Image (cartoon, rainbow, N blue to C red):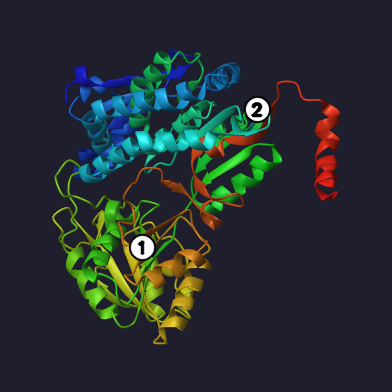
Amino acid sequence: MNSAALRTYHSYVRGERLESAEWVYVLDSGALLDDVFASLTLKRKLEQGRVTAEERPDVVVGRVAKADRATVQRAIDAATEAAPVWGAFPLDVRIQRLGALLHDKLAERAEEIAEILVQEGHPRMLAEWQVSGMLECFGPESTSFYRSQMLQEFHRGERRLQVRRQPDGVVCLNPPQNAPLSSALLGVTSVMGGNALIVRAPRSGPLGVMYVMQEIVAPSLDEVGAPPGTLNVVCGDPGPMLSAWLASPDVDDIMYFGSSENGTKFEARCVAEGKKPILELAGNDVVTVWKDADIDLAAEALTESFYGSGQLCMIPNQVVVHPEVADDLVAALVRKVGHIRPGYPGEPDVLLTPVLRNEKFFKCLDDARAKGAELACGGHAMQLDESRDPNGIFLEPTVIVVRGLADAREIDAVAHETFFPLLPVVVAEPAPDAELLERFIDFVNSNAYGLRNSLWAKDPEIVDRFLARVGNGGLVKVNDSHIGFLPCLPTHGGTGLTGGVFGEANYPILRTTHVQGVSISTGSRPRDAVFGAWRTLRETKTP
């Protein structure tokens, strides 16, 4: 890449691009694989001003202005000014017209968005998966669903009654490091709800966020006549920016992505400051495989556990399987795992990404084996060419077998999210099917986390019982991909340590709005409105 192709983005506040004295530089992810130490050293020198991007046009792909404290405050002020104006726009403009524009622009730029994701380190197949999810989020079926949830109208005599959702006001979004672009776009649905939005582009991956916000979302808002300040995007360190949002009396909601430990602490800070916390924290998803499941398809879905080297929150994290089909499932899974390989992000069929700090993986694996788990495959670090090497920056997809549900959660890899390519298969103790199904359901419901759950079963009675009883999580998939996107259904959100005290399936357009009842009368007599219903009741009972 030559220097002419260097992408440069400033802070975007009130429709203006604000310059800064500091920059965050983005290096092509391929350079990181070639030499991790040299790449990190170059990034540090660039941000210290000791070298320029022009000196390394083959490596530097972009730069983003780092916002100072004054710019962060200007973003809050801009959003505060814009929110009441934008919130008064008609629903059809905010949701359907804006949604259609976003969908069309995303589709038009899909290849370019995927390429930026690849430059930031996402394997091409996963970059394309993310873009497809963005398109579903703003597709006509999804936007029609959003519209239906925002306003329902009824008629009672001469009155028009409404149950509607009104915007909270100013929403701030702190996306995660592993998927900032798609998470920022998810937050844009809060704008469709009538809110003004402030997005923090993370320093670890700011380029995609800035690109999609300034090149796609901002022009779409301009086309529908949204006031300047409806969208604001700044890059900076999370601590100071989150503190500024918490301290501001003008901020209403904060969408926070992070670990469960940090997120639950942040939730308490939000409540103390009068903010609505909307949390996207860790997942520890359970896939249940019944004895009549299609084993080949179930194993194929379970390989999603290793996509991105397990560094995605919504992948399968553990499996509970009927003992009659456990051996067949493990054998099928091990066969399919062998096709998941590392490589440069731009190469086709690559699904593994580097794990730069792998000591937690080996600690977790050692804990499992010490407590009786069996290693079915994997268990080593490796180099780009898949040769085993303790110093390799990739990890082999690893499957362990845990015998028995009763003590399974004594193993760390079952009890908690791992965030690396390690999948426990928990084989239930033999028991009558009716008892076993109840134990499976109890196991899923007692998971401290609650993002997604999946079931593989053909018997409709088993499926119906599972769906009726499982309340844990924000999404349940039956005989389907665990991570595939679908219209209308949520992509994020959950219960327990995944979403905090207020956790549920996360539709930001709904989570950042509140329910309000409305009655519109042409001129009713107030006394009749108060006492008329009782008189009518008495009259109907009088012979």
> In front of the other: label 2 or label 1?
2
In this view, the residue farthest toward the bottom is 431
Asked if residue 202 shows in the view, the reply is no
Q: Residues within 10 Å of mark 2 (few under 14, many from 20)?
A: some
Give percent across and percent down for residue 398: 28, 66
Quadrant of the image occupied by residue 79:
top right
Residue at screen point 85% across, 49% down: 542
Instruction: Give above or below for 177 relative to 498.
Output: above
Q: As drawn, which residue projects farthest toward the front?
A: 543
Q: Which residue is mark 2?
A: 248
On the image, the x and y values in percent for residue 376 come to 26, 75
Tell whether 282 sits left or right of 277.
left
Where residue 537 sits, quadrant-wise, is top right
Query: In what element is the residue under mark 2?
Result: loop
Determine contact: label 2, label 1, CB under 8 Å. Answer: no
Picture residue at 24% right of the left edge, 26% below the top: 108
Quarter of the picture holding the N terminus: top left
Q: Nearer the viewer, residue 523 or 364?
A: 523
Quarter location, residue 291: bottom left
**Mark earlier in primary sequence (2, 1):** 2
Is residue 184 in view from this perspective? Answer: yes
In x, y percent, where is residue 523? 75, 21
In percent of the image, x 49 and y 44: which residue is there?
506
> Residue 162 versus residue 58: which sits nearer the camera?
162
Q: Which residue is mark 1?
A: 361
| Residue type, mark 2 in image | Ser
> Label 1's element?
helix
Structural distance between the alpha carbons of marks 2 and 1:
40 Å
Foreground pick, 224 / 428? 224
* Location of residue 491 with respect to 478 vertically, above or below: above
Q: Residue at x 53, y 45 (%)?
A: 279
